[in-house]
Image (spheres, rainbow, N blue to C red):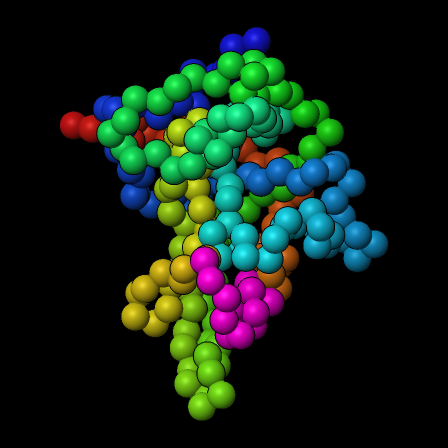
Amino acid sequence: MQYPEVLLPRTHFKRIEEDLSEHHLCRTTPTRNFLNAAGLIKDEELFRNELEFLDYSTNHLGQFEMDFNFLSLCGDNRKYFRSYWNFTDDVICPEYLQDFEVDNSKGVFFFKIGEIHRKIQFPLVKNSKGKNDTFTAIVKHTPTHSNFWHFSIAWIDANGDEVNPRGSSTWKNSLIASIRAHLLNKFLVDKPVPALIEERYFLKS
């Protein structure tokens, strides 16, 4: 089985920064049975580690086809293939069974970018002195060595500074709880219509 060539970053590609409000993101869950009795995503399916919410991994549904969700990285090179690409290096193509396998047991849910990017915003008290800040969701293009169509849901404060997912602070626990609640109100179960990203958005001139 060949790894889909369309997923691989190329040195003539650039970061995607155009408006994709009408496009959709997809994210996998460990199993297809990912909803609870209330019709919400189970916590263990929505995230593996709560800190994931500060740099939430998703894929753009378009050039990244629905079936690609069931490809799973494996092996000794997994860390390399999952790490972010620097827009200059040639990448290695994953090899079947050595670097990736197929897992059809996974579930998939979706977000509309226009419902997330700079649309989710909330205040938060950051310390015991009552200092307030405001956090806003951003959807940004974060290609990996194995997937050019990888996007992240991240968060910026009132100064426009992105929240660092590393490290722990008490206020981050409150931030994560708020993020979880907002994302649970935005997920979609039904597959949306995929939309290809125009070449001029990702090809260098």
User: In this orientation, which residue lies closer to the viewer: 128 or 106?
Assistant: 128
Report whether 105 appears left or right of 139: right
Instruction: Give the residue displayed 52% in from the left and 10% down from the top.
Output: 2
Residue 44 locus on image (x, y percent): 71, 50
Residue pushed farthest front? 76
Report whether 86 appears left or right of 20: left
Q: In the displayed structure, would residue 73 be above or below residue 164?
A: above
Is 178 colored magenta in this rendering? yes
Per the picture, the main secondary structure of the magenta-coloured stretch is: helix
Q: Quadrant of the C terminus?
A: top left
The magenta region covers 166-179
Residue pushed farthest top? 1
User: In this orientation, which residue lies closer to the viewer: 162 or 109?
Assistant: 162
Whether residue 181 appears in this view of the structure is yes
User: In this orientation, which residue lies closer to the viewer: 163 or 166?
Assistant: 166
Is 23 colored magenta in this rendering? no
Residue pushed farthest left? 205
Quadrant of the rendered structure where residue 201 is? top left
Quadrant of the rendered structure where residue 51 is? bottom right
Instruction: Give the residue displayed 54% in from the left and 20% down from the top.
Output: 99
Residue pushed farthest bottom? 129
Instruction: Give the residue displayed 51% in from the left and 14% down from the top.
Output: 95
Instruction: Give the residue displayed 53% in from the left and 26% down from the top.
Output: 76
Whether residue 68 appears in this view of the structure is no
Residue 122 locus on image (x, y percent): 48, 72
Residue 19 locus on image (x, y percent): 33, 45
Q: In the displayed structure, would residue 91 be above or below residue 20?
A: above
Q: In the displayed structure, would residue 57 be above or below residue 166?
A: above
Residue 165 locus on image (x, y percent): 46, 57
Q: In the displayed structure, would residue 176 be above or below residue 191?
A: below
Q: Quadrant of the N terminus?
A: top right
